[in-house]
Amino acid sequence: MGKSNGGKAYFEALGKRRALSGLGVLLGAKERLTWPLWAREAWLSGWVFHAPMAGRNLLDAFTQELIETPDSEILEGLDPTAVKATGLNILRQAMARVAATN
């Protein structure tokens, strides 16, 4: 069952307020995962349509925020060394595939 427009407008306003305050989309993402899907979509649309992008597109804004986010927040309890080793292994496999096709 869908939510009334009043509920949707509330979550859009929350996203708009977050965007206009200059805070990124990742901050508080864990909390928003407990929200129903319609509420998360409404929040994100409020953030997307009101985020101050200053000539950047959404992907650029998201990438910049991801770069500025500390590893500890992104990894959420994972071992950084293991994550780095896995990433390097994936990179080596990709480089090997490219070298094999050339």
Image (spheres, grey):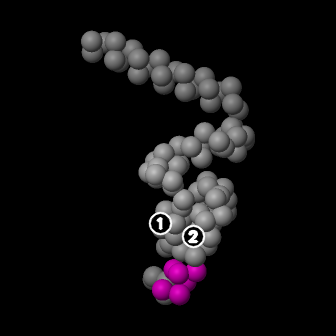
Q: Is residue 7 visible?
A: yes
Q: What residue type is labelled 1?
A: Phe
Q: Which residue is drawn at 62% across and 26% down?
A: 84
Q: Residue at x 53, y 43 (%)?
A: 63
Between residues 91 and 14, which one lies in front from this camera angle? 14
Q: Which amino acid does label 2 sit on?
A: Lys
Q: Is mark 1 on a helix, strand or loop?
A: loop
What is the x, y in percent for residue 98? 34, 17
Question: Badges 1 and 2: C-beta atoms under 8 Å apart?
Answer: yes
The relative height of residue 30 versus residue 12 in the rendered view (above or below) is above
* Residue located beneath label 2 in the image: 16
Numbered range of the magenta stretch: 5-10
Q: Can residue 30 be seen in this view?
A: no
Left or right of 30? Residue 16 is left
Residue found at the very far front of the displayed protein = 54
Q: Which residue is drawn at 51% across and 55% down?
A: 53
Q: What element carries label 2?
A: helix
Please rate how many residues cluster around mark 2, counting C-alpha atoms within 10 Å: few if below 14, some from 14 to 19, many from 20: many
Tell me if residue 4 is in the magenta stretch: no
* Residue located beneath label 1 in the image: 49
What is the x, y in percent for residue 73? 70, 45
What is the x, y in percent for residue 14? 61, 73
The relative height of residue 15 versus residue 53 in the rendered view (above or below) is below
Please rate how many residues cluster around mark 1, counting C-alpha atoms within 10 Å: few if below 14, some from 14 to 19, many from 20: some
Looking at the image, is mark 1 or mark 2 earlier in the sequence? 2
